[in-house]
């Protein structure tokens, strides 16, 4: 299909640039600004919870090896005392925020954006001593643009084998960094053009539970910082970033371009603000697993609460959206035998088994002793996945289970709207509780409350220095 734009129409990159350059906090509804700060808080809590995980120390060692001897780093790394140069801090913070797969998701775009945009902003703001107000403005602008870019693809990035978080995160981060750097609208458009040569993120990790997904948002963050800085130095860049012959949608979607209309990418945005705030459609996760599995997990927990005896379960059919099955259901034999916490996070059979057996799926249920438990393994062998013909995916990440007992009786439970969705959101109070639970895994309650207060007051902060100092403390 021909996705080139009319020469007379502003490019999609320019429309995003005009919006991002003009946005001011006074034009943002109070509820949107407040939710933005709670999304930031959630991501920081996820990073603080990651601090005790083996991947956190190993990534920290690797990034510091790349950085080499640093006399005085510029930006804080969440939960670590040693500071790092701006781009390296953004890289590592993105890994920490995304590492547990507990961070937020924009439903229609199927993308995690806070974990690339926020590390970008924390790092750039630390160097430039930006105000909290500027950080919130840049965050809202980048999220509004990034969610729309991802949504245009209609799930096509995943089908093509790309992880939208790494791909789209580079463009959102370029807008975020450019806003703090002080680029004009032309410069912000140019930054997106430069990011086009940097956006990446493969789904191959799904085949063997590799750790590479964890680096995607941080890589996008440092790419965005680089792109915005190059744009500030007037490096020429492509103009038809998204709709061009070798632009994002034609190049990255390939045969998945059916139904893709780049011209609608900036709908609801202009230089006066937004008529529709996609930030309010960003879902906060109640489970530290792939968002595709949440409704199925909740359905299993609901059945557990009926008092079912797991020993009487003959079989379980899990109805899933067709678009999610390659990620969390296939190949079924591998999904029934997760070998690591990361494979467990992408296994519907394990999510359902844990829900049915224990009535919960917290961080402790993602430890080897839990997903390797003999009873869980035996139950996973009796769990099958099938396409849900009634699913409203990607608007909702639906999930339904049908449990057949040894006497032939069936128990069915459906979650038509996944918990955390904009139509069934976690309240700001719930997000705060989640943050405190995550932050106090390795840090004191006093420290956790200080971080919480600093993040929620960002819109009034003259500088992020206080938050930067709090984040750069070890347990």
Image (cartoon, grey):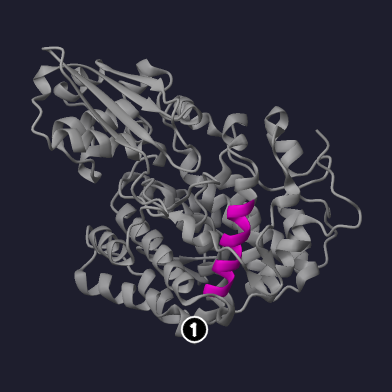
| Rendered view: 326 above or below 276 | above
Residue 230 appears in the figure: no
**Image position of 437 (left or right of 105):** left
Quick one: which residue is furthest to the bottom in this view?
462
Q: Main secondary structure of the magenta part?
A: helix
> For the residue labelled by badge 1, is the local secondary structure a helix, a strand or a loop?
loop
Q: Position of residue 121 (x, y in %)?
A: 54, 68
User: What residue is rendered at 69% in x and 48% in y?
Assistant: 198
Please tell me which residue is depicted at 76% across the width and 37% down the height of the picture.
250
Q: Which residues are magenta?
A: 136-148
Tell me if residue 138 is in the magenta stretch. yes
Vertical side of 393 occupied by 329: above or below: above
- Image spot of residue 202 (x, y percent): 57, 35
| Residue 99 drawn above or below residue 44 | above
Q: Which residue is mark 1?
A: 463
Q: Nearer the viewer, residue 393 or 294?
A: 393
Answer few, some or many: residues within 10 Å of disc 1's Cα (few below 14, many 20 plus, some between 14 and 19). Answer: many
84 lies above or below 394: below
């Amino acid at each position: 299909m021909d996705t080139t734009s009319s020469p007379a129409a502003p490019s999609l990159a320019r429309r995003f640039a005009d919006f991002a350059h003009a946005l001011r906090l006074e034009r943002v509804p109070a509820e949107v600004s407040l939710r933005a700060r709670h999304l930031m808080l959630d991501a920081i809590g996820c990073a603080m919870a990651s601090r005790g995980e083996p991947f956190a120390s190993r990534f920290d060692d690797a990034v510091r090896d790349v950085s080499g001897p640093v006399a005085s780093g510029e930006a804080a790394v969440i939960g670590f005392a040693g500071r790092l140069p701006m781009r390296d801090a953004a890289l590592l913070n993105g890994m920490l925020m995304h590492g547990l797969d507990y961070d937020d998701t924009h439903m229609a775009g199927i993308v995690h954006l806070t974990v690339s945009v926020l590390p970008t902003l924390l790092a750039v703001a630390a160097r430039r001593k930006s105000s909290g107000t500027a950080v919130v403005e840049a965050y809202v602008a980048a999220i509004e643009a990034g969610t729309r870019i991802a949504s245009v693809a209609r799930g096509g990035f995943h089908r093509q084998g790309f992880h939208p978080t790494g791909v789209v995160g580079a463009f959102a981060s370029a807008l975020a960094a450019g806003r703090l750097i002080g680029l004009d609208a032309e410069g912000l458009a140019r930054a997106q053009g430069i990011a086009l040569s940097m956006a990446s993120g493969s789904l191959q990790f799904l085949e063997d539970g590799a750790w590479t997904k964890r680096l995607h948002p941080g890589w996008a963050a440092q790419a965005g910082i680089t792109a915005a800085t190059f744009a500030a130095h007037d490096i020429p860049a492509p103009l038809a970033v998204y709709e061009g012959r070798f632009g994002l949608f034609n190049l990255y979607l390939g045969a998945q371009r059916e139904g893709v209309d780049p011209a609608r990418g900036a709908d609801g945005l202009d230089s006066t603000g937004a008529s529709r705030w996609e930030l309010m459609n960003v879902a906060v996760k109640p489970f530290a697993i792939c968002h595709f599995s949440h409704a199925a997990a909740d359905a299993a927990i609901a059945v557990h609460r009926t008092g079912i005896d797991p020993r009487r379960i003959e079989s379980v059919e899990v109805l899933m959206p067709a678009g999610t099955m390659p990620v969390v259901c296939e190949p079924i034999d591998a999904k029934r035998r997760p070998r690591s916490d990361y494979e467990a996070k992408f296994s519907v059979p394990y999510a359902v088994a844990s829900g049915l057996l224990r009535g919960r799926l917290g961080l402790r249920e993602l430890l080897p002793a839990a997903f390797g438990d003999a009873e869980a393994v035996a139950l996973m062998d009796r769990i099958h996945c099938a396409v849900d013909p009634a699913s409203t995916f990607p608007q909702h990440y639906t999930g339904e289970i049908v449990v057949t007992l040894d006497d032939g009786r069936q128990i069915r439970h459906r979650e038509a709207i996944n918990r955390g969705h904009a139509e069934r959101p976690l309240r700001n109070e719930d997000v705060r509780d989640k943050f405190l639970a995550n932050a106090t895994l390795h840090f004191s309650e006093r420290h956790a409350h200080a971080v919480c207060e600093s993040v929620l007051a960002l819109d009034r902060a003259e500088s992020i220095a206080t938050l930067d100092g709090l984040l750069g403390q070890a347990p």
